[in-house]
């Protein structure tokens, strides 16, 4: 991955280093270097956007959050919690080279059936699909922008 595309986010500065043929990116929250895949490029941007522009507290953002579905352990890409430790936003990230399809929405819906977050985001960094679930969880409403998360 020699060229990192500009995503549909404001510009952010990231620490990127080369290790042989592979690039790595610094995850400042978890304090680890990660292999810079197209999906990780999107995830780093989304975390930065949620914390720097949407008001999410970095302490309340969890990546690769375990979700048990029918006894199988899976991982949600990003979960933002509210101050009462309840899931507020669930995000499923795909690589910028992956088209968002029904499978991505179903994956996020399966995770959210367990987590019950108020907002669900599916993104490939170029296109963002944001939904707000009704209070009773019976339906969702598409949103045209990311919600404030500091409420």
Image (cartoon, helix red, strand yellow):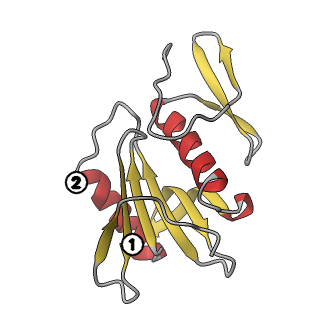
To which quarter of the image does residue 139 belong? bottom left
Residue drawn 39% across the image and 72% down it: 132
Q: Nearer the viewer, residue 35 or 28?
A: 28
Q: Quadrant of residue 145?
A: bottom left
**Label 2–label 1 contact, CB within 8 A:** no
Q: Secondary structure at mark 2?
A: helix
Label drawn at residue 98: none
* Residue denoted by label 2: 102
Q: Position of residue 71 (x, y in %)?
A: 43, 70
- Residue linked to disc 1: 132
Is 99 in front, or is 7?
7
Left-right relation of 53 to 83 = left
Crowd rating for badge 1 (residues with CA inside 10 Å; few <14, some 14–19, many 20+): some
139 versus 39 height, above or below: below
Q: Earlier in the sequence, mark 2 or mark 1?
A: 2
Q: Residue at x 46, y 34 (%)?
A: 7
**Judging from the image, what secondary structure is the residue with disc 1 in?**
strand
**Residue appearing at x 47%, y 57% in the figure:** 91
């Amino acid at each position: 991955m020699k060229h990192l595309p500009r995503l549909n986010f404001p510009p952010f500065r990231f620490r990127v280093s080369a290790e042989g043929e592979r690039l790595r990116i610094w995850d400042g929250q978890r304090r680890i270097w990660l292999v810079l895949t197209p999906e990780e490029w999107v995830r780093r941007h989304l975390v930065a956007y949620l914390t720097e522009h949407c008001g999410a507290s970095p302490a309340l953002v969890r990546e690769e959050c375990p979700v048990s579905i029918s006894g199988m352990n899976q991982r949600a890409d990003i979960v933002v919690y509210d101050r009462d430790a309840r899931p507020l936003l669930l995000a499923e990230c795909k690589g910028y080279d992956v088209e968002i399809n029904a499978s991505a929405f179903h994956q996020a819906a399966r995770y959210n059936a367990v987590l019950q977050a108020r907002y669900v985001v599916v993104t490939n960094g170029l296109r963002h699909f944001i939904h707000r679930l009704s209070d009773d969880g019976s339906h969702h409403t598409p949103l045209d922008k990311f919600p404030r998360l500091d409420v």
